[in-house]
Image: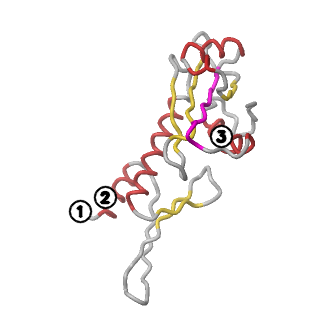
Amino acid sequence: MSLMFLSYRHCYRHRFLLRVHEIESRASNFSMPPIEVFLQSSSRTERFNNPDDLLTFIISEQEMSQFVQLCSRRLDHEASIAIESRFECGPRYRFHIVDDIKTETIRNHFMFRENEWMFSSEKGRSALRNQTGKDRLAVVTLSRTQNYSSLEEVKNELGPFAIRFDPRRNSGLVRFPF
C-alpha cells in the first residue's frame, strides 16, 4: 500500500481533511508533493518536508484533542500533558491541570507558572489550588533545556492552550491571568 493511501485512510477515519496536489518539476519530471496543514486554531499553514512528519503532527494533534476532551469536565485527579517544541528538541512546556474535587462545575480557572520547587509535586500543586480558591488550576512548567526570549513570548505561546483547557463555554473571550 502506498503511503498516500495510508495517510488518506488515517485522515478519513479520524475526520481530518486531506487535500493532495502533485507538482511536477519541468527540469526532471520529478514530482514533489507539498505537505501543508492549516489548523483551525492558527492563522497560518504548517509545511512539512515528508509524510512521516505529517503523520507525527496529526497524531500529536489527536493527543491534544483527547486531552482537551478529558479537561472538558471536572477531573477527579491531576492530569498533565507535555507540549513539544517545533524548533528545539524535547518538550517546551508541561501543563498540570488540578481541579477542586468538591466542586460540581468549574466556574473559574487560573493559570500559574511554576517557579517554586513545592509546585513541582502533585501535593504542592494541589495545595496551590487550595490557596488560590479557584475551581481549576493549570500549572505550567517551562523546560530548562529550552530558550525563552521573554515572558511575553511565553504568554503568547500559552494563550491558545489556556483557552482550550477551560471547560467553560467562553469562546476564547476570557483572558486568563498568568
Q: Which residues are magenta?
A: 136-146
* Residue topped by disc 1: 1
Q: Nearer the observer, disc 1 or disc 3? A: 3
x then y, percent, for residue 157: 66, 44
Q: Main secondary structure of the magenta part?
A: strand
Q: What amino acid does circle 2 point to?
A: Leu
Marks 1 & 3, CB-CB < 8 Å contact: no
Mark earlier in primary sequence (1, 2) = 1
| Quarter residue 144 falls in | top right
Question: Tag 3, which secondary structure?
Answer: helix
Q: Position of residue 19 (x, y in %)?
A: 46, 65
Q: How many marks?
A: 3
Q: Earlier in the sequence, mark 1 or mark 3?
A: 1
* Residue type pointed to by label 3: Leu
Q: Residues within 10 Å of mark 2 (few under 14, many from 20)?
A: few
> Tag 1: residue type?
Met
